[in-house]
């Protein structure tokens, strides 16, 4: 059913907690797992806002996070491919999902999209609206 699962990660607690669901689904369906992390860069002509601690703003941070995640899944007996991208997270996540033919995206959610003000800034909300495949949000 889910041949290829895409798991976007960042440094949030919610992303780490979603990993348990990823392990469960990948093992249940024998899925191929692809982990993606996006180095955030401002759009052309846009100033870079002060980055919260959980934002992915350095190539070293992204590379280390992907390496750590890959090792964690390896301990669970899951071979994971990693993809590193640069740009706006929601758009890059959906691009990767399309490129790899993902059947499912699993991602954590911080809940900032639960308010009207936060909805526009929510990566998970944008992914839900732009995704080429089903999206499972782990609260």
Image (spheres, helix red, strand yellow):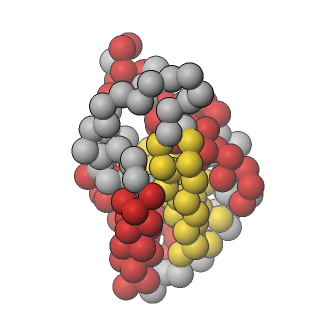
| Residue 64 screen position, x and y as percent | 38, 68
Quadrant of the snapshot with the C terminus: top left
Coordinates of residue 124 in the picture (x, y in percent): 47, 37
- Is 3 on the left or on the right of 43, as rendered? right
Residue drawn at the location 56% of the way across and 22% of the way down: 45
Q: Quadrant of residue 121?
A: top left
Of 107 and 93, the residue lying toward us: 93
Q: Is residue 87 above or below residue 117?
A: below
Report the residue at 55% width, 68% height from top: 82
State which quadrant residue 126 falls in: top right
Residue 101 seen in the current view: yes
Residue at the location (72% across, 60% down)? 100
Horizontal and vertical percent for residue 14? 30, 49
Q: Quadrant of the N terminus?
A: bottom right
Can you give x and y, in whole percent of width and height, for residue 136 in the image?
A: 50, 47
In the picture provided, is 65 more to the left or to the right than 103? left
Instruction: Please give left or right for residue 79 compared with residue 134 in the image.
Output: left
Residue at (42, 73) in percent of width and height: 67
């Amino acid at each position: 059913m889910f041949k290829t699962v895409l798991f976007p990660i960042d440094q949030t607690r919610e992303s780490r907690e979603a990993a348990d669901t990823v392990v469960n689904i990948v093992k249940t369906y024998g899925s191929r797992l692809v982990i993606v992390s996006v180095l955030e860069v401002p759009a052309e002509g846009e100033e870079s806002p002060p980055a919260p601690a959980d934002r992915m703003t350095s190539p070293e941070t992204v590379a280390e996070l992907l390496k750590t995640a890959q090792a964690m899944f390896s301990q669970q007996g899951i071979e994971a491919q990693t993809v590193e991208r640069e740009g706006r997270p929601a758009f890059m996540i959906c691009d990767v999902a399309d490129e790899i033919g993902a059947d499912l995206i699993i991602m954590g959610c911080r809940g900032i999209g639960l308010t009207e003000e936060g909805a526009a800034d929510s990566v998970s909300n944008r992914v839900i609206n732009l995704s080429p495949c089903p999206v499972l949000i782990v609260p």
